[in-house]
Image: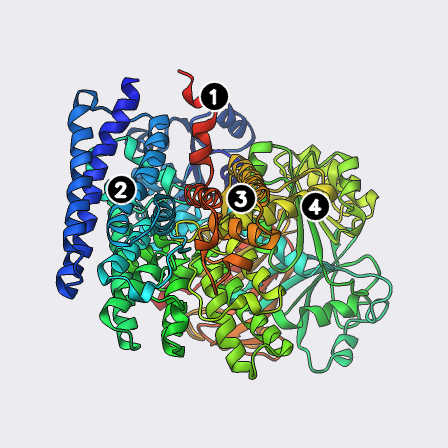
Amino acid sequence: MPRALTVIHALGLMLVVFSVAYLMPVVASLVYDDGTLIDFLLAMIWTAGTGLLLWLLTRRYKGELSIRHGYLLVVAMWTAMPAVATLPLLLVVDGLSFTDAYFETMSGITTTGATVLSGLDGLPPAINLWRHELNWLGGMGIIVLAVAVLPLLGVGGRQLFKAETPGPMKDSALAPRITETARNLWLVYTGITLACIASLKLAGMNWLDAICHAFAAMGLGGFSTHDASVGYFNSPVIEAVLIVFMLIAAMNFATHFLAWRAKNLKLYLRDVEGLATVAVTLASCVGIGTFLWWQGTYPGFWTSLRHASFNLVSIATDCGFVSQDFNQWPIFAPMWMLFLSCVVASSGSTGGGIKMVRTIILFKQAGRELVKLLHPAAVNPMKIGGHVIANNIVFAVLGFIFLYFMSVATLTFMLLISGLDFISAFSAVIACINNAGPGLGVVGPASNFGVLSDFQTWVCTLAMLIGRLEIFTVLILFTPHFWRR
Amino acid sequence: MKILILGAGQVGSTVAESLVSEANDITVVDTDSEKLRQLQDRLDLRTLTGNAAHPSILEQAGIVDTDILLAVTQSDEVNMVACKLAASLYNTPTRIARIRSTDYLERQEVFSADNFCVDFSICPEQILTEYIVKLIEFPEALQVLEFAGGRVSLVAVRAFEGGPLVGRPLRFLRADMPQIDTRVAAIFRQDRSINMSGDTVVEAGDEVFFIAATEHIRAVMQELRRMDKPTKRVMIIGGGNIGRRLAKTLERSYQVKLIEHNKKACANLAAELTNTLVLNGDGTDEQLLQQENVGEIDVFCSLTNDDENNIMSALLAKQGGARKVIALINRSAYVSLVQGGKIDIALSPAQVTIGSLLAYVRQGDVAAVHSLRRGAAEALELVVHGDRVSSKVVGRRIDEIDSPKGATIGAILRGGRVIIAHHETVVEAEDHIIVFVNDKRMVRKVERLFQVNLGFF
């Protein structure tokens, strides 16, 4: 038990840190004078107070976190943060149940971007900013941020970092110290976000929209300040800017950092995974654009290409902006988009899903098996970009894929039991576990997740959480080994 | 000349053997006294046991009045330190080191006078690799040696029935290929050099050495034998230093299979090579060879450390249907035993690499030396200096030069231009001359011929 109290001690401190995040909507409510100032201040005090209380009560148990408690802390943090983040929503939005509010904040912080709220255009600016800020914080990871600003976690920091960052190979050697690595990542992330805000402002958005959409694009969250999402602006320039930044966010931020530090764009050529991410996405854009034009969905080729590109990049990178109701497109197109959402995002990016590097590993593993049949004596290690991938990583990836599909199947069945139709159930689970956003059918781009029952909403919330923490981190808590001493 | 050789391994002992026969004072240093004893039993030289990088040992070995230091131990680092000590403490004029690691070779400044003071670095594995690559590129040739930075080549090829020139006198070569200039440097029939003139008839089975511009090699070979299909598939046995380099060089242009018996080495090889199929197994395992389709292999190279294994696997491959088999053989006795039998080419690493060392040791301005026919013959690239008075060759026609018996001037390089030597060609100062010497004992005389008389200075 004392060990669990150590976790609560750290959790308390993290909540205090998290309460700082309320400053942004507080400033926004002052600027826009939308009458939510008192609600945000209340939420801030309450969060900080709870955190402080937990921290003080357990300060006797301050100590180093072991590996297993690192996992516990990460999961605790990722369930507690959306819970406290619901406070302003519950205080401001009338008639919002806790279930829906929790779905909304979980969707925000896991960068899913699915929403249960309607009438987004009418929400107070501070509330919208709060939702988008959650997108942004969740993108790079709140614990990575904590590790960056607080060297408090010591040795355990690396474990926490690993438990939260997506991808099979987590020893990115950006700096000798984990704190330094985390700080570098956040620096690059913030820098690119500022560039995105400026670009969106230049492309014609107002400041609030520019900041909100930049947050959502860089975190690959996909919240919008409008019910019609990016379709509201109906601007090819804005869509083009967002496409560029979504692709940037779907690549490994370690690559961005290395390229920025060396001031050398050639480093991108060494990131095999990032190249595959961009290549597959762009090729699919052209393919789907041509397909829609051929099917006569849109009158001209360029219109087809524009709509196909924006929506495809948005779904494939697990962002979740929409500009058209792709539910109405011939079923091949949205299905292909959902498929891409499973595989396209790079590890170390802010996107979700299986990750491109795991897909590459699976493909190469299949190739290895074929070579092995032809040449039984062959020594054929797996190589990506000239580096050998150890067999234990290959096994870990195979295990991950299995758990991923088992999770998809289980969650889909749970939604089917509750009475949802197959397309809606399946696409909702895929959209949530990949942190993509809109699904098809009743949860398609034209409507939102508000139509789901409470039980269905909780299933989707769970899907988002295990998707963001890449399944292992969550499931490990449910194994008997974890609790055995 | 006083020469100090550090390291009595393959390279060291072969160099020692070759240099002793040229009347030099040789001292050999090694840590293995047994090796030194064997060497001393065979050759007339001094030996010393000890660490070649220690100043006290170097002093005992007489480094103070040494003319040339040859650091050829197993360790790059020992070689480099020895060169540094020789330069800094003892002012040794010429320092040559064997350096294997590409890490050092890629940064030539490591060897500069400010750093490790290595005048010349040689890498036997690299030389051997380049040699084999040539043989794979020209599968009909027995030997392809380059001069003048690759512009001129000396090629050994066995004449076969079916070549247009076979059975006809040499002078028809010119008539058959008016646009291509070449010169036949020597013909060996039943292992003996024969005296040549324009009327000499080429017989099937002759080993013909000719000199031509590198781009004409193929055309000349066509005169002497039917051409094979170009090489596509290569199999290499042994993933040591040479096998690894060879695979790395070849893997982009050929289909390469590499068989190595050590599992750990296999993993490293597979990590380093991108396009080579690395197989774990024994090169003498005929089932494995069969399974990997040895019958479809164009060139089979057996390059392990073990002579007997190399011979056996090359024989197995030949029997299995490989088109051309090459075996690496260290023991010189085996080389002459095997060459020309079922194994197409027996490679003696020492013979292939020694030339690059000899070039630095020779008197006169020698740009390159290649050892031929297992050390019995030699081809040299010499630079001529002086004028008509101080030099015995400058300003004279080729047929006026009093060249020793068995020495043939094959080609002249003048300012980047290749001139195939004929009777009436006149030699000028600063020409690079490629001379073929069919008896090694004549080399000294050839060197003396090309040296400048003292009056020049």
Res. A370 mark = 4
Q: CA distance from mark 1 to mark 4?
A: 37 Å
Q: CA distance from mark 4 to mark 2?
A: 52 Å
Q: Chain of mark 3?
A: B
At a point 77% along the width and 48% down the height, the residue shown is B340
**Of pointers 4 and 2, the one earlier in the residue sequence:** 2
Amino acid type at circle 1 is: Pro
Viewer-nearest residue: B138 or A285: A285
Q: CA distance from mark 3 to mark 1?
A: 39 Å
Q: Chain of mark 1?
A: A
Amino acid type at circle 4 is: Leu
Q: Is residue A58 above or below residue A48?
A: above
Residue annotated with mark 1: A480
Q: CA distance from mark 1 to mark 2?
A: 29 Å
Residue annotated with mark 2: A84
**Of pointers 1 and 2, the one earlier in the residue sequence:** 2
For disc 1, the neighbor class at 10 Å (few under 14, some 14 to 19, many from 20) is few
Q: CA distance from mark 2 to mark 3?
A: 50 Å
Q: Nearest to the eye among marks 1 and 2: give it.
A: 2
**Of pointers 1 and 4, the one earlier in the residue sequence:** 4
Left or right of residue B164: residue B70: left
Viewer-nearest residue: B308 or A462: A462
For disc 2, the neighbor class at 10 Å (few under 14, some 14 to 19, many from 20) is some
